Image (cartoon, helix red, strand yellow):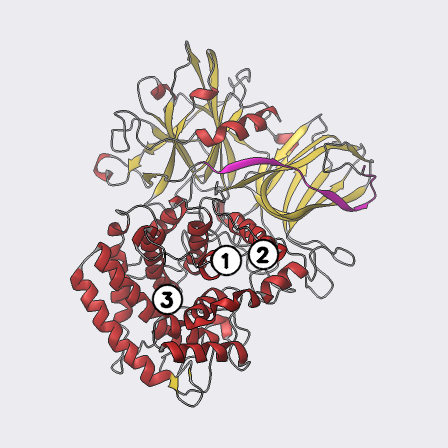
Amino acid sequence: MKNLLIICSLFASLSVAAQFGNFNRNSPWDASWICVPDAGENAPGLYLFRKTIDIKSVPGQFEIYVSADNRYKLYVNEVLVSIGSAQGDLGHWNYEALDIAPFLKTGENIVSAKVWNEGNLRPVSQFSLRTGFLLQGTNDETKQLNTNETWKCLEDKSYTPLRQSVRGYYAAGAGDKVDMNLAVKGWNSVDFDDSGWEKAKPVFERQVRGMGFMARGGWSLTPSILPPMELTYQRLASTRKTENVSVPSSFPAKKTKITVPANTTATILLDQAYLTNAYPTLIFSGGKNSTLVITYAEGLYNEAGAKDNRNEIEGKTISGRQDTVISDGSQNQEFTSLNWRTYRYVELKAETDDLPLVIEDFYGTFTGYPLEMNAKLVSDIDELNTIMEIGWRTARLCAVDTYMDCPYYERLQYIGDTRIQIMITYYNSGDDRLPKNAINLFDNSRQKDGYTLSRYPDTQNQVIPTYSLWHVSTLYDYLMHGKDNTFLKTKLLGSRQILNYFISYIAEDGSLKNVPGWNFTDWVPDWRMGVAPMAEDGSSALMDLQLLLALQSAVILERSEGSEEFAVLYGKIARSLEQTIRDKYWDESRKLFADTPLKDKFSQHANSLAILAGLATESTAFEMGKLMLSDTTLAPASIYFKYYLHLALAKAGLGDNYLNWLDIWRKNIDLGLTTWGETSEVETTRSDCHAWGSSPNVEFFRIVLGVESDAPYFKKVK
């Protein structure tokens, strides 16, 4: 607990600029990547590194760079000071810049690292070359910590990555299986005897991005632009259900001992009361060879497989991500997961052998990107305050070292989700570091043909063409709401390549056709895999409209930050596409745009984008908006696409009715969700936390209050 309190107060001050004095990322690095000798390059495992240094006088600064593959936790004198590395790819591998002077003392100091590799069970977002650890000092004094053969190392055999069995698509990595009988205890203390440890083995020298001629290696290093993640002590709220064990009413809100008798299988269902991301910590004693299984869930399932009201537990069972711990029988054993978990409910299941087991405590340490709510909405309507609170929680849980579609199931940064999440960040926080990081990553994902991947980092190279087009619109959003007026100039080449790729698929009739990939638009029940209707020739109003919106964004981007020639070119193509869309998809009898040239299917989606693209006059848009709200034959927008629907309705002159359009958010609240669900089918939605549903956190300000950027970098409000 002492270490936790220290880290909560000091962690935020650790990260420093990626250049120290005269030493910068392009200076010659003399540290080596190191590994444990004889450990498999890509084998799953937990690896411990440590080095003792003597400090005669604590300096004012002690600045280092640190990185690892897959991930690390760095300690100074037993205090956790850094967790990383921030996600990237092998060509853009992040290192953290730290000042560890606040944690040093006169005399002997121990600097240690825990590095782990989940092998083939690692998250889909986690790139990896091989297991390795790197620490580089920035001057003669700090270089005594450079990773090389002077570091000691050992594989901690207690750890095994645990394959997960989770309902629905899951991509978030392994659980932890830890046998405390094999654990190395006290390994990061100065007094620990490491005489039996091996010398670390240099893998090869580091390679700074762009300096490949000077070094061998496969990680091209780049400084992380992100601050340290927040770490905040957090207790669970209540015990909801027990079996074969007596639990005092004070647990888990307060530290309380619970004794599980010998030869017993006991379960304790705990409730956080709201969804959270946290590193769970379990402290326990005795119970030699007892097995503890920790199951984490967003909600419980009934017999039909639905979650229904998330507050209700009767007749339901828990299912989800798990960790497993085996007791060695000693006192005050401690388990903290290597990576953070997402949960509202936690089940502790203990199976004891011939000795009783004492659960000493269970709590969490919340983590996430340190977003701060700097916007303020004052309303005497309690419902609006609740929606803002839930939306902000959802946004925060979907933002760590990248934005994520969801923290429980995937932890993948999708362009479609991220565009909305970035807008929430602009309107609620104003911090543009995570948006810039996301834009950088998507730009890095571009393939040789020019398009981006749908999500990134992504080791599976998923392609959603429509998301590549949303990326261009995301650049436009940064132009209108970001802070750095030099940033976008580095992204225009990517925007041009994306548009060039799609323009190459424009057919003779002026319409996009047969763009390869998963052309996802929205989770509409009648649309297979979320793909909007297409004609037999491969054309689709939604595809044409998204290209049009991207071209319109690019015209403004180029005129502001780039080339007038490109602005003119994109404007010309856009005007031609506008006419094609009107000719092919406008249905005069229904006064709406159809999804295909057959004009037999219609959606809120196509008409929303048509209005946003300016394809309807003011009076026509107004009538279209009324039809979009009243015509139940239109394919409906889900909670995700309501972002575009509501923008279109506001542009059509119906924005005064915005507070009447919040039924799906009210349904989430009625069913006990504390974050917004993935889809509009709230009872059965896979994920309970998707920030693409937090658009009210933008629209309360933009639509209801009229706070809308009317000039680059928010210099003017409409």
Distance from the alpha carbon under mark 1 to that under mark 3: 30 Å
Q: Quadrant of the C terminus?
A: bottom left
Q: Which residue is mark 3?
A: 465
Mark nearer the N terminus (3 vs 2): 2
Residue 684: x and y in percent read 64, 65
Q: Amino acid at mark 3?
A: Pro
Magenta stretch in the rendered image: 228-248
Secondary structure under the numbered disc 1 in the rendered image: helix
User: What is the crowding at mark 2: few (fewer than 14 residues within 10 Å), some, or many (at least 20)?
Assistant: some
**239 or 486, which lies in front?**
486
Eyeballing the image, is 320 above or below 18? below
Q: Amino acid at mark 1?
A: Phe
**Left or right placement of residue 375 versus residue 225 in this view:** right
Eyeballing the image, is 5 above or below 462? above
Q: Quadrant of residue 590?
A: bottom left
**Residue 452 visible at all:** no
- Residue 467 shown in magenta: no
Secondary structure under the numbered disc 3 in the rendered image: helix
Residue 651: x and y in percent read 41, 69
**Left or right placement of residue 622 versus residue 313 in this view:** left
Q: Which residue is mark 2?
A: 384
Q: Which residue is mark 1?
A: 700
User: Which residue sits at x=51%, y=80%?
Assistant: 634
Eyeballing the image, is 226 above or below 606? above
Mark nearer the N terminus (1 vs 3): 3
Eyeballing the image, is 218 above or below 134? below
Distance from the alpha carbon under mark 2 to that under mark 1: 9 Å
